[in-house]
Structure formats: structure tokens, C-alpha cells
Amino acid sequence: MTDAQVLDILVDALVVAAKLAGPFLISAAAIGIAVSLLQTITQVQEMTLTFVPKLIGAALILVFAGSWMLREVVTWVKALWTSIPGL
């Protein structure tokens, strides 16, 4: 196994991780900004107001995009397993 092959596997793993984490990070940022704006307008500074909507957003992402995420991981693992004899 050469250094280039190891780096290719690492880059592929990081790309898959970024694809899977992206929806969570984007929704958490959007929900955080919206809740911050709401807290600023109403001057209510309660910490649970930021946590619960983000948790609900993450759960909705898992419900709607969970099958896509699982397919991405399975596809990457299958490609990795099939490339093992060539390594």
C-alpha cells in the first residue's frame, strides 16, 4: 500500500464525512441564527431555547435524509472493501 493510496482513502472518508455532517451543520447554524434573532428581539435569554430547536432539526434531518446518509456510507464501505485486493 502506497502513500497515495492511503491519502486517497483518507480523502474519500473525509468527503463522505463532510457530506453527512453538512446538513446537520447547516440546519444548526440556520436554527441558531433564527433563535438568536428571536431572543434578541424578545430579550429572553434562556439556554434551552437554543438547544431544543436544534435537537428537533437534527431529528428531522435524520427522518428525511437518514436513508440517503446510510446509502452514502454503505456505498463508500463497499468501494473500500472491493479495493482491498488491489491494495
Image (spheres, grey):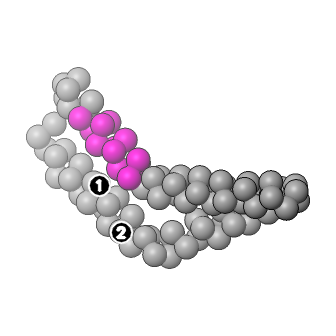
Kindly identify which residue carries mark 1: 77
Q: Residue at 80% of width from left, 58% of height from top?
A: 41
How far across and how far down the image is residue 9, in percent?
Answer: 27, 38
Q: Is residue 9 above or below residue 81?
A: above
CA gap between label 1 and label 2 equals: 14 Å
Q: Residue at 35% of width from left, 68% of height from top?
A: 68
How far across and how far down the image is residue 2, in percent?
Answer: 19, 25
Q: Which residues are magenta?
A: 8-19
Under circle 2, the secondary element is helix
Kindly identify which residue carries mark 2: 68
Mark seen at residue 16:
none
- Please check the rendered image and state whether residue 34 is part of the magenta-colored stretch, yes or no: no
Left or right: residue 40 compared with residue 11 = right
* Amino acid on which disc 1 is placed: Val
Seen from this angle, which residue lies furthest bottom? 63
- Please check the rendered image and state whether residue 15 is part of the magenta-colored stretch, yes or no: yes
Q: Residue at 19% of width from left, 44% of height from top?
A: 84
Left or right: residue 3 compared with residue 45 = left
How far across and how far down the image is residue 15, in percent?
Answer: 33, 45
Kindly indicate the quadrant of the structure image that contains residue 40: bottom right
